[in-house]
Amino acid sequence: MPQVRIIAKNFMDMVAALPAMKLDKLYDNSFICEAILRSLPPLAKKYVLQMLCVELPVNSKSMEEWVLPDGASKHRVAIDRLVQLRIFTETKKKGDVTYTLNPIFQTNLKKLLVYGVVLPREPMPSSVTVRRPSSEELEAFALEQWECFLLQLINSSQTERPSNISSSMMKTFQRGLVTQRDREAPRLTESGFQFLLMDTNAQLWYIIREYITSSEERGIDSADLISFLLELSFHVTGEAYNINTLTEVQKNTIKDFTDLGLVKLQQGRKESWFIPTRLATNLSVSLTDTSSRKQGFVVVETNFRLYAYSSSKLHCEILRLFARIEYQLPNLIVGAITKESLYGAFDNCITAEQIISFLQQNAHPRVAERIPSVPENVTDQIRLWETDLNRVEMTTAYYYDEFPSRDLFDGAVDYARSYNGLLWEAPDDSKKMRLVVRAENHGHMREYLSGQK
């Protein structure tokens, strides 16, 4: 996954930032406990399970003996994460540190392991939900909704807004990704361009973080929203669930999630129901599992030609961010990676590594197993074209000339050089005495020259 600035904050960091009371409220739900457990580093999961039936505090030195010496760094990471999420309570007394498992988390996780998984709510019988979509139709719905959102994000001024995506939702999700000045068409920000090259899981969690962040403005408790979100991931894809089992806030949230393709709403004669799509049920898994490869579609040749086996308009628009699209057939996009197209991407603060990572992650199955999946001459040239833009470094400086004597000029050059502030001096054979000094050394130079007069 491309490492970009806008995803530096992990979703679980947001959970860890909740006040202690809200965290304990979250842990009252066994589904949340399981989702949090899934998100932990492997060693942290091991510690939780080892301490699940331990009621007394465990000494930190005893815990250090649970790992080999070369695992000390992973041990520290695991402990820090558990303390941040208040799964472990850290107690320091007379130089001794002990850890205790959060009793609320411990009790609910025990219930989950002893009594097994009980679904948050029972699915509705198929006799009531007779018009339920097939798995293929549900997948197509989720994909269409997601692509509609991203297409509008790419070009808000030209893409027609789908009637089923509310303007308030778009404003929430576009915050930080799209900017608009007076009388100008909306355009993507630096973060917006980077966002489009992220994988779907990372994009989805970024949007959900924005949605949760803005929840307080709408008068919604962020802890309640996080709880419902993670609970939603334990529903079964394609099953229908009665909307009347939801609270008023949850009903409004479900309507918002429909815009993203997380759920599909349907209306019967007497009942209404929602059907989770794969995007929703994969939420808790995608917190940690970013390794699952989706079906790739891009082939890059050594001559910089690019072939994308896709009928998606979204794929075409994303490729257009860094490649020159030459023509598009019903199931094939043909283009080329050129110096000019990459310069356009670099101007929008998309980096060479992000482009290369996108091409590698979306490599067609025929080339995905090759090493490398993208030709080395192409990746090397993309990096070289990026460095071309960074060859000139701007430095604030002062220019000095019209020295009354050669001795004063030579002394000024030596003085500037002693402060490591000399950037340029006229050649020795030049009759003109000129030099350029860094701006931060100007005060010293002025004092020196005043003293020489």
Image: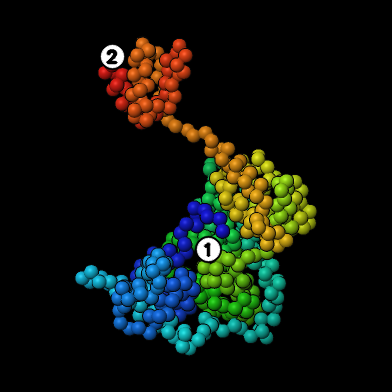
Q: Which of the two discs, 1 and 2, labels the residue nearer the N terminus?
A: 1
User: What's the residue at 63%, 65% (across, down)?
Assistant: 293
Reply above or below: 203 against 409.
below
**Residue depth check, mark 1 versus mark 2: number of the one nearer the observer:** 2
The answer to whether any part of residue 150 appears in the image is yes
Does residue 75 appear anywhere in the picture?
no
Q: Secondary structure at mark 1?
A: helix
What residue does disc 1 label? 205
Residue 301, relative to residue 25: is it above or below?
above
Query: Where does residue 258 sit, x and y in percent of width and height?
Result: 60, 67
Apparent side of residue 182 relative to residue 344 in the rendered image (left or right) = left
Q: Nearer the viewer, residue 391 or 14?
A: 391
Q: Residue furthest left?
A: 94
Helix, strand or loop at mark 2:
loop
Q: Quickly name the residue at label 2.
A: 453
Q: Residue at x 37, y 30 (%)?
A: 420
- The front one of 344 and 184 is 344
Q: Mark 2: few, some, or many residues within 10 Å (few <14, many ≥20)?
A: few
Report the front residue among 280 and 91.
Answer: 91
Residue depicted at 47% across the width and 72% down the height: 42
Q: Residues within 10 Å of mark 1 (few under 14, many from 20)?
A: some
- Residue found farthest to the bottom: 115
Residue type marked 1 = Trp
- Where residue 78 sits: x, y (%)? 41, 69
**Which of the 4 image quarters holds residue 91?**
bottom left
Q: Quadrant of the N terminus?
A: bottom right
Residue 319 in the image, given as x and y percentages of width and height: 67, 51
CA gap, disc 1 to disc 2?
66 Å
Q: Which mark is residue 307?
A: none
Residue at (58, 51) in percent of width and height: 354
